[in-house]
Image (spheres, helix red, strand yellow):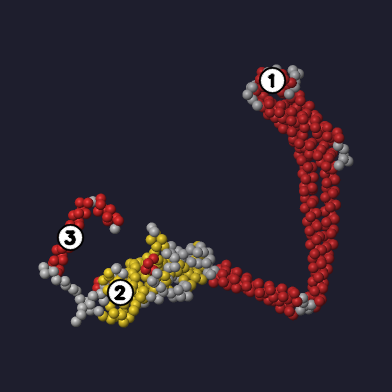
């Protein structure tokens, strides 16, 4: 009313014309109906007894009573697909088979394992015989022999490792002693390579003049020489403090330091050789230093070859020491484990012989019974997994949808859709507002009409009422499912349907037209004629 009043206020002329039209039209209609004499005329209706029906109405769509998507529980190769679109299927009908080769093998293995466990249980229940005791005695003797062999092996490993290390340290010290005579000569030639008759700086400048100031070869040689010179001095000093019968860690350090020093010297020699090779290629004959280069180049090359041999021999000694030190603990550990295992086996065989002589242990029998039970469960699981490869129809209906892309031999994933089965039984799913839904409950009867089939009216029964509503743009609605009392093939899923649900019915009730009821204040009344 407020909106109408507001609209009328804003458009006064339009409102005035509309009101005037209503007044004149009403007067004309009154006169036409009642006549010029102004007499009141009544329309009479007969009150009758009948059934008073209160209903609520809603609209929705037709759907299947139930439908289920057929999905395999396992992945694998599709061996067969027996369902075809729009074909009827029955509950329990085989629809598809997933390759069951591995599942059958697993079931067969489980059956064999169960049989073995049952045989062992029977043997325990029967008790040991003389043959079992004899075999146990022989097994104990063999275990004792293995134990003695493991003890000898452990002792031999320790002795061999000690002998190998002793020889390696002695050979290493001997090699180091001989190496320093060579290293001293190497360093003398390297020193001469950078310092001829003219003096060190003049010699270096002459190299740079031949090669060019931008060449890095001279500086690389000088850096490598200085590194080698420093290592040589340190290692030679340590050599003077270390003797053949010094602690092994000191001897080992001397061997390693000598190897690193030799490598550093060989790098300096190689840098000198590269420098001389470049000088030779740079027309060095034009310089006064050419005769010196011709003399030093062969010396450096000879020293480099000798240094490589020395690095190789020292490296082999270090490898022997490292390998022995690295592998000996593992060998000792393996020997100790083997010895411990032999001891445990010997003890186990002794215990087994005693058990055989004492007869079957009740605990062993109970344990084996538990194992049999576990194997039975494993077999049941294997059978269940095998059955998962066979897919049966869970309900009767029509194959409304089939994955047409699948063919025999295709890989099928667990949970992927093979087909959708829908029941022939149809239902109507309608939407009601929050006021009407309060009157609806399961079991109430309904009449159903269809836009696509105007001449058809069916009856149904309310089967399900949503407990939770759906809110959209502030409006709350609820879904109601109505099961058809009878089926008509013309009715298809997704068709529009209107439903009138009978929420109240009172038989033998006096009925009058709704238009005959008048009201005054809070009182409702009807007018009746007398006579």
Q: Which mark is residue 457?
A: 2
Could you say where residue 165 lies in the image, as x and y percent from the top left? 83, 46
Residue 444, by quadrant, is bottom left
How many other residues sit within 10 Å of disc 1, few (<14), some (14-19) or many (≥20)? some
Determine the secondary structure under disc 2: strand
Tell me if residue 488 comes above or below residue 172 in the rendering. Answer: below
Give me the residue at 31% from left, 80% from top.
509
Q: Quadrant of residue 258?
A: top right
The mark closer to the camera, 3 or 2, is 3
Say which of marks 1 and 2 sits in front: 2
Q: Which mark is residue 23?
A: 3
Query: How far across and down, in percent of the image, does residue 141 sit?
Result: 83, 68
Residue 205: image tag: 1
Q: How many marks?
A: 3
Q: Quadrant of the C terminus?
A: bottom left
- Residue 63 versus residue 255: which sits nearer the camera? 63
- For the N terminus, give its image quadrant: bottom left
């Amino acid at each position: 009313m407020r909106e109408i009043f507001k609209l009328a206020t804003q458009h006064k002329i339009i409102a005035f014309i509309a009101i005037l039209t209503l007044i004149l039209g009403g007067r004309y209609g009154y006169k036409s109906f009642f006549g010029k004499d102004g007499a009141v005329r009544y329309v009479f209706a007969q009150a009758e007894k009948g059934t008073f029906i209160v209903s609520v109405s809603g609209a929705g769509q037709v759907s299947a009573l139930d439908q289920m998507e057929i999905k395999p529980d396992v992945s694998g190769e599709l061996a067969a697909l027996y369902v075809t679109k729009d074909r009827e299927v029955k509950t329990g009908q085989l629809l598809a088979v997933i390759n069951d080769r591995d599942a059958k093998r697993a079931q067969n293995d489980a059956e064999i394992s169960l049989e073995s466990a049952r045989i062992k249980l029977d043997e325990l229940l029967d008790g040991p015989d003389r043959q079992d005791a004899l075999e146990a005695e022989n097994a104990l003797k063999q275990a004792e022999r293995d134990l003695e062999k493991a003890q000898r092996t452990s002792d031999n490993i320790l002795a061999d490792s000690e002998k190998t290390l002793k020889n390696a340290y002695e050979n290493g010290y001997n090699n180091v002693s001989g190496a320093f005579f060579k290293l001293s000569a190497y360093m003398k030639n390297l020193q001469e390579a950078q310092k001829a008759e003219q003096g060190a700086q003049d010699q270096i400048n002459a190299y740079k003049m031949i090669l060019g100031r931008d060449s890095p070869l001279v500086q690389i040689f000088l850096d490598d020489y200085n590194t080698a010179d420093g290592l040589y001095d340190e290692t030679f000093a340590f050599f003077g403090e270390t003797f053949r019968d010094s602690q092994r860690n000191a001897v080992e350090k001397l061997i390693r330091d000598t190897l690193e020093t030799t490598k550093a010297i060989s790098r300096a020699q190689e840098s000198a050789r590269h420098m001389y090779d470049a000088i030779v290629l740079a027309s060095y004959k034009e310089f006064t230093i050419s005769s010196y280069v011709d003399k030093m180049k062969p010396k450096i090359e000879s020293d480099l070859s000798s240094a490589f041999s020395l690095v190789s021999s020292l490296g082999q000694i270090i490898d022997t020491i490292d390998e022995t030190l690295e592998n000996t603990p593992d060998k000792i550990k393996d020997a100790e484990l083997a010895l411990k295992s032999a001891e445990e086996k010997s003890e186990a065989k002794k215990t087994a012989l005693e058990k055989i002589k004492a007869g079957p242990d009740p605990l062993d029998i109970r344990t084996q019974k538990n194992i049999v039970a576990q194997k039975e469960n494993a077999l049941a699981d294997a059978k269940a997994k095998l059955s998962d490869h066979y897919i049966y129809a869970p309900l009767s209906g029509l194959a409304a949808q089939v994955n047409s892309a699948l063919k025999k031999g295709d890989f099928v994933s667990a949970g992927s859709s093979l087909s959708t089965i829908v029941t022939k039984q149809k239902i109507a799913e309608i939407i009601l507002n929050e006021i009407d839904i309060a009157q609806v409950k399961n079991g109430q009867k309904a009449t159903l009409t269809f836009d696509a089939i105007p001449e058809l009216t069916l009856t149904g029964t309310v089967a399900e009422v949503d407990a939770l509503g759906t809110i959209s743009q502030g409006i709350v609605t609820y879904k109601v499912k109505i099961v058809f009392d009878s089926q008509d093939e013309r009715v298809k899923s997704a068709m529009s349907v209107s439903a009138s649900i009978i929420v109240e019915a009172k038989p033998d009730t006096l009925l009058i037209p709704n238009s005959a009821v008048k009201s005054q204040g809070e009182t409702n009344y009807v007018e009746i004629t007398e006579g």
